[in-house]
C-alpha cells in the first residue's frame, strides 16, 4: 500500500532490462552516441515536429534550466502558488534563472487566468523598480492531481502570447495528464502555445530520465552551455537515452500512465462509495486527495500503508472536520489493484 | 579499440544486474531509503571513519558542490592549470561556488607546491581588491595520467593547513589512483589532510554514480540544501546507491581499476618497446600519453581505433616532432587485451 | 508642491557645504581615510555601542548586502508584502543574497506577527524541498508611512530570536521613525533585537549616504568582501563620510526629520479638516496617504503639484470611491509650509 | 607628495561648486530629471554619435555591468593579466556577469594580440566543456601607465570583430589616455570598434561619477534592469549628472587630464635625469613606474611622500637590483609642481 509518491516506485521491468542490455559495449560520451541521436529523433516523432531535446537528471533540473533559458535581469516567473517549482525545489529555479518565482492563486492547482493577468500587469516591462514579467510556467498534471483542459491551456497561452511571455509546462506527470485528456503530445503542448516542456519519465517507470523539449529549436541555442554549466550533462548520457527508448517502445509510457491513472480511478470510486471518507476535490490523473477519518488514517498506517497528510488549502479552511484528515494518495505504474482494495478496506474499518 | 575515454565504456555487468534487481518494489524517495542509508554506512567502512556522503549525478556536480560548500565572497580556488574543474566543466565550479578558479602550473598534471605557495601569497585574506584564497583542489589520478604520491599529497596538504584552506580531491579516477599506489582509501585522503572528496565511480564501471564525501561531517551541514538547490537530489536516489552497493561488493571496484590500469600498463610496455612511438611522459593510472607517427595514428583510425589527439603542453613545445602526433589513450574496466594488442600492431605498421 | 518622494529633494545646505570643504586635499582611498575612521566612531556614539559600519551608495545596496551577509542556500527572507526590498528593488536582494524574498501581509505596512509565525513554520530548517527560513526584515518607517512601536518591534524580534533568524531593519527613513517615536537610535534597534540596519541618510538631506550597521561586529567579518564584490566600495569614500559628518553634527539629522514629519503633520491636519478629502490610514512619519476627489487631484496637478496616485491595497478594495483617488504625499527636509498650504488649498477647490 | 593614487585627490573646485549649486530645489529621482537628460545629451555630443549612457557609482560597477550585458553561460572574458578587472575588483566582474575572466599576457600592460588569438582559439563556440569566448576588455590608459595607440586598438578590435566578440574599454583613466594620444573621444572608441566603455571621471576630478557608454544603443536595452538589480541606480542621480556637467564644461576634463599627465611628464623627466633612479618602462599617461634606490624610497617616505612599492613583473625578474625598489607614482589634477620637485629632491638625496 505505497501511496506516498509515484517516485517511491522502482523502474518498470522493460526499462530496467533495456538498461542492462545497454551496459555492454562502447559509445561516444556526453550525448554524442548513436543511441542519443536516435532517441532525440524519436522525441521529434512523438511530438510530430522538429524540436530540440536535452536530457537531464532530475525534474528540478528540467524546470530550472528551461526557465533559465528565457530569463532576463529583474525577471519574474509566474507559476501557481502551490507549484512544484515554487514550493518543492529549494529555490533551484530562482538560483539557475536569476528570476523570482511569483505564485498566482487558482482553484484545484490551476492558475486563475484573471489573477495571472492582474499580476502580469503589476510588472510592466518598463518599470525597473518592480522587476518585469518574463515567463509563465504551468504544471500538467498539476500538484493537486487535476489536469488543465486544452481550453484552459489555450486561455493561459493567449495571455502569454499577448504579453510575449514564454510559456513553460512542467510535465513531471506529462503522461498521466495526456492519457487523462486522451489527446496527443502535440495537441497538449505546442499546438496550444507551449514553448518549453519538462518531459518527465522518472515518476512513470524510469529510474532517472528527464528531458527538456524546446518546440522552437532556435530558442535552445544557449541550452548546451546552460546544461553543461549546471552539471547536468551526463557522460554516459546514453543510459538516459536507453530508458526513453524503452519508455516509448510500443507506447509503453502511455500504458504505464493509464495503469497509474486507473489505479487512482479505483481509489476515487472506492472513496466516493465509502462511508465516512470523501474526495477533497475532483482529480483526474494519478493523485487522489481524500478527507478521511483520523481513525481510518491510523488504521491504514498500522497496516503499513504509506501516504502523506496534506495541508488544508488556505482558501478552504473549513474543508476538513476536527476528526478528519486530508491525505494525498499517489498511484503509479507499479501500484496493484490489491493494494488499492486493501487500502479501501482500511477506510471502511 | 576504444581509447577515447573511460566514459565511452558502458556499465559493468554486476552493476547493471544490481540495478535490474533494484527495479522492483517501493522505497522512500530522495535518499531516505534503507538502501541509501546502508550504502552510506558502507562508504564509512571503506573510508574507516565517520563521514558525510552525498550522492550526485555527475563528476562536475561533485566537484562544483564540494567547492561551493567552502566558498566565501571574493574567493579564489587553486587548481592545476589543466585540471578538469578549470578546463572541462564550462565554468560550473565558478557558477555554483561563486569563486574564481585559478590555475597553478606544475609538471605532469600535478600542482607545483612552490608555485602554489606563491599564488596563495598573492591573495591575502585582508586585501579586498584581489580576492582571497579560499580552497585548493587536486585531481587524483591527474588529467595527465599521473598519480600524486602520498608524500606529494602531504606537501600540498601542509600548505593548505598552514593557510587554513580546505583541501578538495577530484577523484573522478579515484580507484585507478588507489590501486596504482597500493594504499587504502583512508591513507590517500583524510589521513593526508583531504577535507572533501569527489568520489567517482562512473568512469570505473557504473553508469551514473558519483558521491561527495566530507571527512568532517560537521562541515557538510549546508550540503543537503546546496545539493537540492543545485537540482542534484535524485528522487529515485536508491538507484545510485544500488550501483555503489555492487561497486563495493567483494572489492569489485578495485578489481575493475586494476584491470583498467593493467591495460594501460600493457599499452605502456608495448609503446616503450615499439619502434617509432614513445611515451610522452610516464603515467601510472589508466591513461597513456604517447607520441606516435602521424602515419600510425592514421592507420589506427582507419582500423576503427578511437582516441584523441592531445594538445602539446605549452611548457614543452619541442616534445612532438613534425611527423608525429601526441595522443591520449584511456583504458577502462571494459578494455580487452586484444584491443590493446591490435592497437600496438597498428603502431608497428 | 513636490510631494512625489523625499528623494526629489536635493541636499541640505550644511551637507552640501561640508562636501565642498572636503573637496580639497588628499586622503587615503577606499575607506581608509582619517575622516572615514572618525565618522565610523561617530556612528558608534550615535548607537551607544561597539558596531561595524560600512558605507555604500544606495539603499538597495544597503538592504541587499545586509541580507547577503546572513544567507544560506535555499534561504527564504521574510518581509512585508509591500516592503521596498520585495516591491521596488528589481530583485536586487534576491540577486545579492541568493535567497527568495517572501511577503508576509499585515495592516498598514507592518508585518502581522501571527502570519509571520505561520510562514516561518512552513519553512522548517530540515526540509530541503521547501527551502528554509533564514532572515526577517522590517522597514522603519514603513512604506505605508507608519512606524512600528517599540512593542511591535519587540514582538517581531521575539519571533526572530525564537527561530534564530537574523533580524534586519530597512531604515531608509530611519530618522523619520526615530523622531516620530521620540526614542534613541539604540532603543529602536539593538536594544530591541535588531541585528543589522540599513541606515539611510539620502532621503533626509544627503545626496548619497547610506550605511550598513552591524550591532555585533563579529557578524560583519565577511562584509568587506561582500561590499567590494558588489562594486559598492567607493574610492573616494570620504565624501560619503563627510556627508554623515555634517548629518550628525548638532543633531542636524534629527532636526531635518522633525521638519519633514512636521510638514506631514500639517498635511494630515489639513486633510482631516478638509471637506471631501480624508486620510486613507493613520501615518506618523513623513508620508501621508489620502483619499481625495479626482477633481482635486487634477486641480493640484494643474497647479504643478507632484505626487503619485497609489494602488488601492487589495485587502480593502472598497477604500476608494469611484470619483476619488488614493494619493501618496511625501514631505522632506526641504518641504516648505507654503507648499503644504498651497496643496491644501487645491484640495479645498 | 601624494603619489599613491589619483583617487587620493579630492574633487576639483568647479565640480564641488557645481554640486553645491545643485543641492537646491527638487527634481525627478532615479535618473529622470532634466539635468540627467541634458548630461546624457552632452555625452552624445562628446562622442559625436547617438549612444546610450548610464551613470553608476564606481568604476568596478561600470566594468562589471558592461561585461554583464554581453555574457552568456560558460562565457570567458579576456583581459590583460594585470588588468583592474581581474586583479583589483574582488571578482565583481565574474559575480555580475557569470563569466570567468581570463588573463592574457602582454608587455607594458597591453594585451599581446597573438596571445589573445591563441587564447580565443582555445575556447571555440561549440565545445561546451571548455566554456566559450564571449568578450574582450582592454584598459585605456593601462594599469602600467601606458596607452594603446590607435593602431594597437585597431589590432585588438580586428580580432574581436573576426570572432564576433564584444569589445569593452575600461576607461578609468580615459581622459589621461585621450590627451596623451591627442585624439577625439570618438577616434579612441567607436571609430576603432569599441562597443562599450567604462567612462571614469572620479580619478580625474569628480568625487563619484562613472558612466557606462554603449555606442550601439540597441545593445543597452537590458541595461536599466541590469543596473537597478545591481543596486547602482542612484535616487538622486542628478548629483552624478551635475558632476559630469561641470566636468565637460569648457573642456575642464581635458585640462585636468593634461595637468595630471604633465605632472607625470615632470616626474619622468626628473627621474630620467637623476643619478641612481630610472624609469622601469616608458609610460605616457599619469602613472610613472620607477626603479629607485631603497634609501631614496625611505627618505621620501620619511618626508611624507605617499606611494606604493610595486611587484616586479614576473616576466622581468631581473629588472630591479637588490638595493632598489620598484615604485608606482600616480599624479592627478591636484598634484602640484612643488610636490613633484620635492619628490625628485628626495631621490637625489
Image (cartoon, coloured by chain):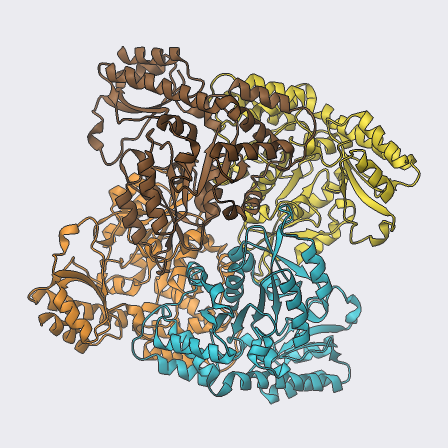
Chain colours: A orange, B cyan, C brown, D yellow
x and y percentages locating residue B5 in the rendered image = 58, 75
The answer to whether residue D71 of the structure is visible from this angle is no
x and y percentages locating residue A193 in the rendered image = 33, 51
Left of A182 or right of it: where is B111? right
**Quarter residue A91 falls in:** bottom left
Q: Nearer the viewer, residue B63 or B47?
A: B47
Q: Nearer the viewer, residue A57 or B213?
A: B213
x and y percentages locating residue C305 in the rendered image = 37, 16
Left of A210 or right of it: where is B91? right
Which image quarter holds the N terminus of chain C?
A: top left
**Quarter residue B331 falls in:** bottom right
Left of B235 or right of it: where is B183? right
x and y percentages locating residue B280 in the rendered image = 73, 75
Q: Residue furthest front?
A: C48
Q: Nearer the viewer, residue C110 or A145?
A: C110
Residue plotted at (78% across, 48% down): D107
Residue plotted at (36% across, 68% down): B30
The answer to whether residue C204 of the structure is visible from this angle is yes
Does D205 sit above or below residue B63?
A: above
Residue plotted at (40% across, 83% down): B18
Does C122 sit above or below residue D245?
A: below
Amino acid at each position: 500500500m505505497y501511496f506516498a509518491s509515484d517516485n517511491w516506485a522502482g523502474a518498470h521491468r522493460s526499462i530496467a532490462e533495456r538498461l542492462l542490455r545497454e551496459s555492454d559495449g562502447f559509445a561516444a560520451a556526453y550525448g554524442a552516441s548513436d543511441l542519443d541521436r536516435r532517441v532525440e529523433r524519436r522525441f521529434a516523432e512523438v511530438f510530430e515536429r522538429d524540436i530540440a531535446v536535452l536530457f537531464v537528471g532530475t525534474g528540478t533540473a528540467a524546470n530550472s534550466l528551461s526557465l533559465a533559458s528565457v530569463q532576463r535581469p529583474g525577471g519574474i516567473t509566474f507559476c501557481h502558488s502551490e507549484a512544484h517549482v515554487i514550493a518543492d525545489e529549494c529555490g533551484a529555479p530562482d538560483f539557475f534563472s536569476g528570476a523570482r518565482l511569483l505564485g498566482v492563486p487558482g482553484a484545484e492547482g490551476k492558475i486563475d487566468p484573471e489573477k495571472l493577468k492582474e499580476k502580469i500587469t503589476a510588472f510592466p516591462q518598463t518599470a525597473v523598480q518592480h522587476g518585469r514579467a518574463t515567463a509563465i510556467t504551468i504544471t500538467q498534471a498539476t500538484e493537486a492531481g487535476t489536469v488543465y483542459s486544452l481550453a484552459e491551456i489555450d486561455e493561459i497561452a493567449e495571455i502569454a502570447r499577448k504579453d510575449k511571455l514564454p510559456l513553460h509546462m512542467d510535465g513531471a506527470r506529462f503522461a498521466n495528464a495526456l492519457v487523462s485528456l486522451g489527446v496527443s503530445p502535440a495537441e497538449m503542448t505546442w499546438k496550444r502555445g507551449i514553448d518549453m516542456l519538462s518531459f518527465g519519465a522518472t515518476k512513470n517507470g524510469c529510474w532517472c530520465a528527464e528531458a527538456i523539449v524546446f518546440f522552437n529549436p532556435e530558442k535552445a541555442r544557449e541550452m548546451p552551455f546552460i546544461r553543461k554549466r549546471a552539471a547536468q550533462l551526463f557522460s554516459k548520457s546514453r543510459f538516459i537515452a536507453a530508458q526513453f527508448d524503452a519508455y516509448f517502445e510500443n507506447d509503453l509510457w502511455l500504458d504505464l500512465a493509464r495503469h497509474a491513472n486507473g489505479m487512482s480511478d479505483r481509489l476515487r470510486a472506492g472513496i466516493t462509495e465509502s462511508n465516512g471518507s470523501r474526495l477533497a476535490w475532483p482529480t483526474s490523473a494519478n493523485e487522489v486527495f481524500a478527507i478521511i477519518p483520523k481513525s481510518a488514517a491510523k488504521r491504514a498506517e498500522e497496516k503499513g500503508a504509506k501516504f502523506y497528510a496534506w495541508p488544508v488549502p488556505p482558501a478552504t479552511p473549513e474543508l476538513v472536520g476536527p476528526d478528519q484528515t486530508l491525505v494525498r494518495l499517489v498511484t503509479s505504474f507499479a501500484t496493484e489493484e490489491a493494494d488499492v482494495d486493501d487500502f479501501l478496506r482500511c477506510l471502511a474499518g
